Image (tube, rainbow, N blue to C red):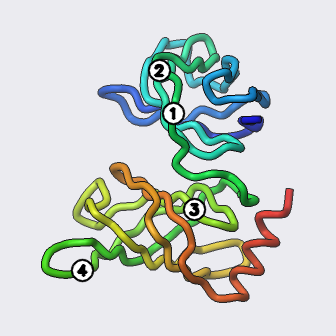
């Protein structure tokens, strides 16, 4: 079963426009992603839009073509076939400031680049980072590992992240290592509702 909870933030990327953050107004679910019914969302205006939707659900994160019309988001085109990160772990959406260093897989070796931004989704197994270097709007290509310092409600959390997927200014990854005290605090934080 795939569930998109009420209150989730979904991003719709339309050609020639800034990404549009849409808040789901009600929970929707279906046995498969391709069978999700239209999703009621809080829309900034009544303008009809088409674009690529970053869909965060209980099954994971995927990208699909979508249409926004009259406060309803409908998946269009071919159904999504891939889920970037499975959601077997407890997670919490939010916005948490982050700074760190990304390690690039470049020839002849690895290059390090400083980045800053925010973690927009955190779970006990990984996170979604939206960040960039000071001199760019996008993350550099080929990131294999990221060392982050994240401002969490209980304090600064340091973690090493292995890249699962990278697109423009977004990086989704799984934890490679973190302090055991941070791991326990993160587990408790993600379990809160």
* Residue 69 appears left or right of 168: right
Q: Secondary structure at mark 2?
A: loop
Kindly indicate whether the residue at mark 2 contacts the one at mark 1 (C-beta within 8 angstroms). yes
Q: Nearer the viewer, mark 4 or mark 2?
A: 2
The residue lying at 13 percent from left, 80 percent from top is 108
Asked which quadrant contains residue 145, the reply is: bottom left
Q: Secondary structure at mark 4?
A: strand
If you read the primary sequence from the N terminus, does the residue marked by circle 3 or circle 4 appear first?
Answer: 4
Query: Is the residue 122 above or below the residue 100 in the image?
Result: above
Q: Which residue is mark 4?
A: 110
**Alpha carbon of mark 3 to alpha carbon of mark 2: how far?**
27 Å
Q: Which residue is mark 3?
A: 127
The percent position of residue 170, horizontal first and vertical second, equals: 42, 54
The residue lying at 40 percent from left, 61 percent from top is 131
Q: Nearer the viewer, mark 3 or mark 1?
A: 1
Q: Which residue is mark 2?
A: 78
Badge 3: residue crowd in 10 Å (few <14, some 14–19, many ≥20): many
**Alpha carbon of mark 3 to alpha carbon of mark 4: how far?**
23 Å
Q: Secondary structure at mark 3?
A: strand
Badge 1: residue crowd in 10 Å (few <14, some 14–19, many ≥20): few
The percent position of residue 103, horizontal first and vertical second, equals: 32, 76
Q: Which residue is mark 1?
A: 81
């Amino acid at each position: 079963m795939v569930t998109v909870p009420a209150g989730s933030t979904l991003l719709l990327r339309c050609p020639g426009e800034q990404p549009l953050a849409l808040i789901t107004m009600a929970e929707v679910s279906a046995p498969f992603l391709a069978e999700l019914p239209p999703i009621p969302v809080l829309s900034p205006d009544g303008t009809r839009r088409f674009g690529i939707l970053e869909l965060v659900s209980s099954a994971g994160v995927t990208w699909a073509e979508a249409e926004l019309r009259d406060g309803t988001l409908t998946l269009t085109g071919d159904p999504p076939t891939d889920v970037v990160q499975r959601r077997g772990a407890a997670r919490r959406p939010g916005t948490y400031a982050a700074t760190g260093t990304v390690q690039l897989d470049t020839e002849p070796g690895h290059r390090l680049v400083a980045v800053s931004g925010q973690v927009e989704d955190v779970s006990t197994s990984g996170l979604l980072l939206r960040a960039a270097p000071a001199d760019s709007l996008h993350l550099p290509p080929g990131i294999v590992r990221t060392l982050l310092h994240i401002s969490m409600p209980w304090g600064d959390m340091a973690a090493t992240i292995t890249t699962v997927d990278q697109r423009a200014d977004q990086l989704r990854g799984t934890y490679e290592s973190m302090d055991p005290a941070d791991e326990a605090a993160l587990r408790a934080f993600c379990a809160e509702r």
